[in-house]
Image (tube, helix red, strand yellow):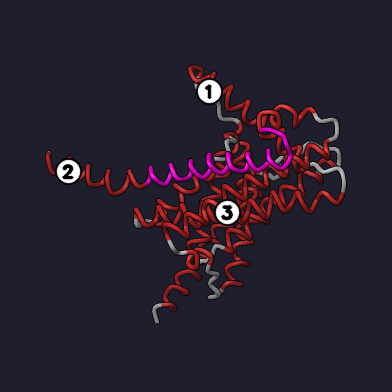
């Protein structure tokens, strides 16, 4: 009995506590980054964060409101996903080169396969979004359900204000914030730092990929999209692990966000409500099978490149 307790204590010390440390660092990046970006935003604009949250949806000109919201989002991304993580890597890991190294072995093949995998995964992710939205918590958790629904509505309101542009010249700053900054920054933090740190703790890439994917989905605080976002995060995690290059998930993340932006505005142009579920179940099954075949091909390419590196 004592040996089992000792084994549990050792596992707790060596695995669980360091994992909690990673979660706390993530919370620190978010809280400190939000505070610093809010402080800088207030110094530049003279608008406090409290006033900003109250006034942003009351502005008569949506273009002006969008400008302020994009500026706030950009500063948030710079501090949370770039400045603090890069400082952390430089000070504590001293391994900036390893994180940002773009490996060239079969890079073109990995990019092509990754894009095809992402495209063929879209119908499945679309069906998963619909499934996630239909999940209802037990009656005893109705208050929590109401809070989650309110957070979802607020997030959707912010998303609509950001991406539904009125003038063509707004496209570039919108894409820069929602696709470039988000794609690069979130992948640096969740794949480049968190996934690698969890991998070092557990020595298991699958645990590292899915734990970082769950955290990636959780911090968006859009729980009606938690499952599809986690699956997308897992997919990005495997593509990063197999390719060995952070460039791969960055490219896919950028394409995903840019595609979502395009589809939302195209639906508005046609006077339709944007929906993620326009594909039939049969087409979803076929595309998912093709996606699995492509994933196997990507894994085999990873195995081949890995074998070549030892010769």
Circle 2 — which element? helix
Residue 153: tell me if it is visible: no
Q: Position of residue 142 (x, y in %)?
A: 54, 19
- Residue underneath mark 3: 82
Does the magenta portion include 77?
no
Sequence-wise, which precedes: disc 1 or disc 3?
A: 3
First in sequence: mark 2 vs mark 1: 2
Residue under the image location 80 percent in, 44 percent down: 265
Q: Main secondary structure of the magenta part?
A: helix
Q: CA distance from mark 3 to mark 2?
A: 40 Å
Image: 228 above or below 193: above
**Where residue 207 sits: x, y (%)?**
40, 51
* Residues drawn in magenta: 19-48
Which residue is located at x 51 percent, y 51 percent? 190
Q: Residues within 10 Å of mark 1 (few under 14, many from 20)?
A: few
The disc at residue 6 is: 2
Q: Residue furthest bottom?
A: 311
**Closest to the observer: 95 or 257?**
95
Residue 108: percent from left, percent from top = 61, 72
């Amino acid at each position: 009995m004592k040996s089992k307790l000792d084994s549990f204590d050792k596992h707790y010390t060596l695995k669980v506590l360091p994992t909690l440390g990673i979660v706390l660092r993530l919370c620190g990046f978010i809280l400190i980054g939000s505070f610093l970006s809010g402080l800088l935003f207030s110094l530049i604009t003279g608008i406090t964060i409290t006033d900003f949250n109250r006034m942003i949806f009351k502005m008569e000109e949506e273009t002006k409101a969008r400008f302020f919201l994009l500026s706030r989002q950009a500063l948030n991304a710079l501090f949370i996903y770039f400045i603090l993580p890069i400082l952390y890597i430089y000070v504590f890991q001293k391994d900036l080169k390893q994180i940002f190294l773009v490996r060239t072995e079969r890079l073109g093949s990995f990019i092509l396969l990754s894009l095809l995998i992402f495209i063929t995964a879209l119908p499945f992710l679309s069906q998963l979004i619909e499934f996630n939205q239909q999940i209802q918590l037990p009656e005893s958790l109705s208050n929590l359900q109401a809070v989650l629904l309110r957070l979802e509505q607020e997030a959707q309101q912010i998303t609509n204000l950001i991406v539904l542009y009125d003038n063509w010249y707004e496209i570039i700053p919108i894409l820069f914030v929602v696709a470039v900054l988000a794609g690069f920054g979130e992948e640096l933090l969740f794949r480049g730092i968190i996934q690698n740190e969890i991998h070092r703790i557990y020595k298991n890439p699958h645990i590292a990929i899915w734990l970082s994917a769950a955290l990636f989905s959780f911090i968006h605080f859009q729980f009606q999209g938690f499952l599809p976002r986690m699956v997308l995060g897992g997919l990005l995690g495997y593509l990063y692990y197999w390719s060995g290059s952070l460039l791969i998930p960055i490219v896919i993340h950028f394409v995903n966000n840019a595609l979502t932006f395009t589809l939302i505005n195209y639906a508005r142009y046609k006077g339709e409500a944007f929906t993620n579920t326009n594909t039939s179940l049969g087409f979803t099954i076929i595309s998912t099978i093709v996606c699995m075949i492509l994933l196997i091909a990507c894994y085999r390419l990873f195995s081949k490149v890995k074998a070549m590196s030892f010769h």
